[in-house]
Amino acid sequence: MSDDDPAGDDERATDEATPRHDRVRGHPTPGPLNSLQHWTSAKSPLRVALNYVVVWLVRVSPSLKLKNWLLARIGVTVGDGVSWGLEATPDVFWPEHITIRDHAIIGYDATLLCHEFLQEEYRVGDVVVGERAMIGAGAIVLPGVEIGDGAQVAANSLVTRDVEPGATVAGVPARPMTDDESTVEGTETAKEE
């Protein structure tokens, strides 16, 4: 029941119309116990412990260069110029399923999850954050989600589906913002004067 290897290229769909659930792989955990009770069969406890220590260091280090170096050591694909905010958390079980492209920003206390432990199965899927994308403070990105180049995720949002390149999403679950919602307060007044 191991899923240490990232999903194959044929399983990584890039079509925005593909629901995230089509990009996560389910792993049944038979018996009366919930899937989290089987975590030691899913991933090496030693590997998870090592990941946890590295993730803790990433969360508290003020150095962006050190954060990116540490993230790469646990398998995260980190592009050039990535900014990883304080207290932001990559998936501890399967960080190798995270790709963060050049100059993306992961905000304070944001969480990128690549797994879901459910009652009768656990699921694993890739998370891709596009070039120059921004994820706001406290946002949570679920497994199988792709955030397009230049996209923006508002603070405290729950991202349950792909975000189109250049789009701005907000809310629980995150939805595209309309032009009226994304207008900066005071911009209309300044135009009228």
Image (cartoon, helix red, strand yellow):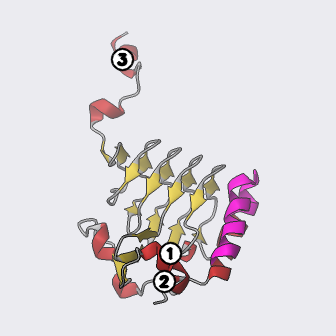
- Whether 110 is drawn above or below 126: the answer is above
Task: Residue type at mark 2: give it.
Answer: Pro
Q: Residue at x 56, y 52 (%)?
A: 105
Q: Residue at x 43, y 42 (%)?
A: 154
* Residue 75 drawn at (x, y percent): 61, 77
Q: Secondary structure at mark 2?
A: loop
Instruction: Please give the residue where the numbered disc 3 appears in the rendered image.
Output: 191
* Residue 78 drawn at (x, y percent): 60, 68
Q: Are marks 2 and 1 in contact (CB under 8 Å)?
A: yes
What span is colored magenta in the figure? 48-67
Q: Is residue 61 magenta?
A: yes
Q: Residue at x 66, y 72 (%)?
A: 51
Q: Secondary structure at mark 1?
A: helix
Q: Residue at x 64, y 50 (%)?
A: 87
- Whether 184 is drawn above or below 147: the answer is above
Q: CA distance from mark 3 to mark 1?
A: 45 Å
Instruction: Please give the residue where the numbered disc 1 appears in the rendered image.
Output: 97
Q: CA distance from mark 3 to mark 2?
A: 50 Å
Instruction: Please give the residue where the numbered disc 2 appears in the rendered image.
Output: 6
